[in-house]
Amino acid sequence: MDQETLLLKLSEQIESLSDQMDSGFKRVDERFESIDRRFESIDSRFENVDNQFVSIDNRFERMDQRFDHMDSRLDGMDQRFDDMDRQFGDMEQRFDDMDRQFGDMEQRFRDVDQRFGEMDTRFDNLISYMDKRFDRIEYAQQHDIKAMLDIIDQKVSRTLVDIDFLSEKTGVHDVKLNNLAKRLDE
């Protein structure tokens, strides 16, 4: 093969690898954005995951630098392409592993969402229970107050009857005392 054909083949492979990397980077970026939007409130728990992604990004940057050096170095190109193919296989495996990890994290978040739903249901049930209890307490208090008012009303009625009775008796006694006083004065 002449050098021009080799360079064209090399350029096509680099372009293909660059497209694969761009696609991979886009998938990783889209996943990060999705996770950031959905799980912003739990972000502090996953700082280690973010640090791992930063490490992966650094590896990708180093690989980009290797590709730039490959353009300037034509000697030993075949061996380097074999090495790069092996490295891309590892990267695809890493992407598959990351996809699996994202799937696991999404499942965990679905489980957390489900638990929150269950807690909401239990909280709603507790509120309903407490409302019923408060209604019963309020009814009992109203019933007790009414019973007390009835007892007070009965005592007041009896007291009025007693006052009327005693008024009659004192009226009779007043008349008798006045009669006695008149007799004594006479």
Image (cartoon, helix red, strand yellow):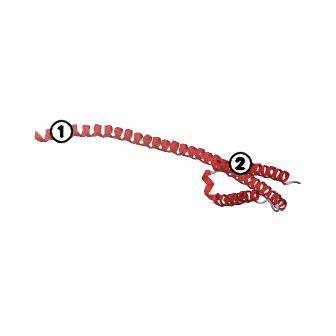
Q: Residue 138 carries which label?
A: none
Residue at 54% across, 42% down: 135
Q: Percent position (x, y) of residue 116? A: 65, 49
The answer to which image quadrant residue 81 occupies is bottom right
Instruction: Report if residue 47 is visible in the image.
Output: yes
Mark 1 closeness class: few <14, some 14–19, many ≥20 residues within 10 Å: few
Residue at 39% across, 42% down: 155
Foreground: disc 1 or disc 2: 2
Q: Residue 178 carries which label?
A: 1
Amino acid under disc 2: Lys
Drawn side of residue 99 relative to residue 186, left or right = right
Q: Nearer the viewer, residue 138 or 118?
A: 118
Quarter holding the C terminus? Answer: top left
The answer for how far apart the CA atoms under marks 1 and 2 are is 118 Å
Residue at 76% across, 53% down: 99
Q: Is residue 75 above or below residue 26?
A: below
Q: Name the residue under label 2.
A: 26
Q: Percent position (x, y) of residue 89? A: 82, 57
Drawn side of residue 176 relative to residue 54, left or right = left
Instruction: Report if residue 118 is visible in the image.
Output: no
The answer to which image quadrant residue 105 occupies is bottom right
Q: Percent position (x, y) of residue 40? A: 61, 51
Q: Percent position (x, y) of residue 158? A: 38, 40
At numbered mark 2, what does the secondary structure look like: helix, strand or loop? helix
Question: Of callouts 1 and 2, which one flags the residue occurring earlier in the amino acid sequence?
Answer: 2
